[in-house]
Image: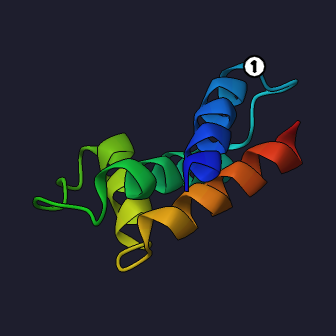
Amino acid sequence: MSDLNTAFEQAAADSKNLPEKPDNPTLLKIYSLYKQATAGDVQGERPGMTAFVERAKWDAWAGLKGTAPEAAKQQYIDLIESLK
């Protein structure tokens, strides 16, 4: 388990130094996987229609509901590796 956590922390650091900025759908995937891995299922109410960015983030995170934190960490690591 500690190897997964170490790799996840390294991927989080690597995500800040990618060769090019990912497109918006990929950024949402990165965000939602990170949140699912670190905080679990989305909580709270869905943001309103005028809060476009917050609503998109919430929706992306909500799409991962039920995903185990360990699975989200591995998917996050794999995604960041594919972007290097």
Which of the image's four quarters has the N terminus?
A: bottom right
Name the residue at the top extreme.
17
Image vertical order of residue 41 relative to residue 51, above or below: below
Q: Which residue is mark 1?
A: 17
Coordinates of residue 54 in the picture (x, y in percent): 31, 44
Mark 1 crowd level (few <14, some 14–19, many ≥20, 10 Å Cα): few
Name which residue type carries label 1: Asn
Kindly tell me whether residue 22 is visible in this rendering.
yes
Q: Residue at x 72, y 27 (%)?
A: 14
SS for dot 1: helix
Q: Residue at x 11, y 61 (%)?
A: 45
Kindly tell me whether residue 24 is visible in this rendering.
no
Coordinates of residue 22 in the picture (x, y in percent): 74, 38
User: In this orientation, which residue lies closer to the viewer: 42 or 81?
Assistant: 81
User: In this orientation, which residue lies closer to the viewer: 7 or 64?
Assistant: 7
Q: Residue at x 34, y 69 (%)?
A: 62
Q: Residue at x 44, y 55 (%)?
A: 37
How was this image coloured? rainbow
Q: How many numbered discs sit on the rendered protein?
A: 1
Q: Is residue 16 left or right of residue 18?
A: left
Q: Is residue 51 left or right of residue 6?
A: left
- Give residue 58's quadrant in the image: bottom left
Q: Is residue 20 left or right of residue 52?
A: right
Name the residue at the bottom extreme.
66
Which of the image's four quarters has the C terminus?
A: top right
Image vertical order of residue 45 relative to residue 28, above or below: below
Name the residue at the left extreme.
44
Coordinates of residue 72 in the picture (x, y in percent): 53, 63
Coordinates of residue 16 in the picture (x, y in percent): 66, 22
Image vertical order of residue 44 relative to residue 15, above or below: below
